[in-house]
Amino acid sequence: MSMYRKFITRILEATNWEDMEVAWQEMLHTDFMAIHELSMENREEFIERERKVMSGDNGHPGLLKWQCLHENDLAMILQLTVEDQKFVICCVLKNDQLFRMMVPGTGMADRGD
């Protein structure tokens, strides 16, 4: 199964935080890093931020429009549409897990704060 298909079926179709947290734990490499414009997050920090997103007004990431622009064994490029803005998220894959995620610096890192 492709990483994008795993992302769609495990993360976006989760109906509660517990299911989503298990999915993130399985999908993120133990050395995962989310790289933002001016900061970085490790695996635990990323999962904690996603927990805040789920409990905040922004709600579930499944409410956003996702599109896979490219995927192979090494990388996955996603386009996220939020209202009328489009963002590109670049992911490096390792051992069939998300190893690095480059996130745009336009407030995406602060969605749950």
Image: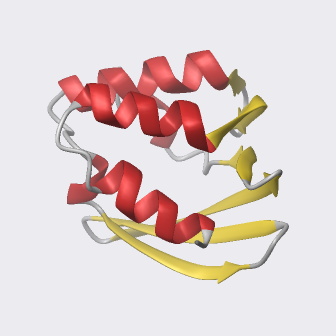
Q: Is residue 109 above or below residue 10?
A: above
Residue at screen point 70% across, 61% down: 90
Residue 107 can be seen in this image: no
The image quarter containing residue 3 is: bottom right
Residue 30, horizontal then vertical, whole percent: 76, 27
Query: In the image, 37: left or right of 14?
Result: right
Quadrant of the rendering where the N terminus is positioned: bottom right
In the picture as drawn, the residue positioned furthest to the bottom comes out as 69
User: Residue 60 versus residue 17: which sits nearer the camera?
Assistant: 17
Residue at the front extreme? 1
Residue shown at the point (26%, 55%) measured from the top left:
13
Q: Which quadrant does the C terminus fall into?
A: top left
Residue 7 on image: x %, y %: 47, 58
Q: Residue at x 81, y 71 (%)?
A: 73
For the residue pair 105 and 61, the one nearer the viewer reads as 61
Which of the 4 image quarters holds residue 75?
bottom right
Q: Which colour scheme appears in the figure?
A: secondary structure
Left or right: where 6 falls relative to 51: right
Question: Percent from the top left, x then y, of residue 94?
Answer: 84, 51
Q: Is any part of residue 39 visible from this angle? A: yes
Q: Is residue 12 above or below residue 108?
A: below
The spot of residue 45 in percent (x, y) is 58, 17
In the image, residue 105 sits, relative to residue 52, either above or below, namely below
- For the image, the number of numbered tags is 0
Residue 63 lies left or right of residue 65; in this view the side is left
Residue found 71% across the figure and 49% down from its top:
97
